[in-house]
Amino acid sequence: MPSSMPPPTVETSTAPVNGYQLLVAMLLMPLASALAVASWALYALLAKHPVFVLVPMSSGMLLAWPVWYYARRGDTCRVMQWLLLGLALSLVAFAMASQPWEFLCVGGGLGLGGAMIATGVAHSEGWMPGRTARSWVGLCLALAAGIGFSLRMTPLVVQAYGWRAAPLSLLIPLCMIMLLLWFFVESPE
């Protein structure tokens, strides 16, 4: 016979509801968003023409709403992993680009970062319903960290290894986050 008591939730339970999953998820999603913004800042710093700076942001805004809608109804971790893979491929293409049309295509691919940010918001809303303001504050701090990371790292990598190594330097933390999401994080139910 089923119990008449409702299942525990984050608000009503005194025992932690899979606190490990919550901790890892709330750390990795903002880090992934910070890397997306770091790739945008890197693209802005290395852009050949000033108009190219608008390409990742505009494509990110166009991708954010449909992906957010899909992520709210599906598996947010798998969506985030596919977006991280797409962002990794865009960074590799960025390192190999030489023509202006290639840089425009790379900028469009880096727009997946906007979809990653939207997926991170959908994921945090799944773990903490009703606490959206805290999610947005954490997200804004992660975005500022991504810009700061890119502004500090890019000149050092460009000076030491050339501009083509700068996009590839973001692949290491990107792959680490992708693997950690794959092994340790589940989507909220």
Image (cartoon, rainbow, N blue to C red):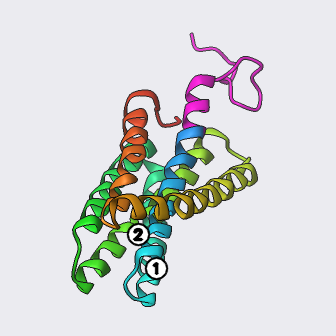
Helix, strand or loop at mark 2: loop
By secondary structure, the bulk of the magenta-drawn segment is best described as: loop
Q: Is residue 68 visible?
A: no
Q: Position of residue 9 (x, y in %)?
A: 68, 29
Task: Give the spatial CA distance, label 1 vs label 2.
Answer: 7 Å
What residue would you read off at disc 2?
111
Helix, strand or loop at mark 1: helix
> What residue appears at the point 47 percent right and 76 percent down from the top-left corner?
44
Span colored in magenta: 1-26
Circle 2: residue type: Gly
Based on the picture, tell me whether residue 178 belongs to the magenta stretch. no
When the figure is inspected, residue 159 is found, relative to residue 108, above or below; the finding is above
User: Picture quarter containing residue 102?
Assistant: bottom left
User: Residue 58 — which label?
Assistant: 1
Task: Verify CB contact (< 8 Å) between mark 1 and mark 2.
Answer: yes
Q: Is residue 139 visible?
A: yes
> What residue appears at the point 22 percent right and 83 percent down from the top-left corner?
99
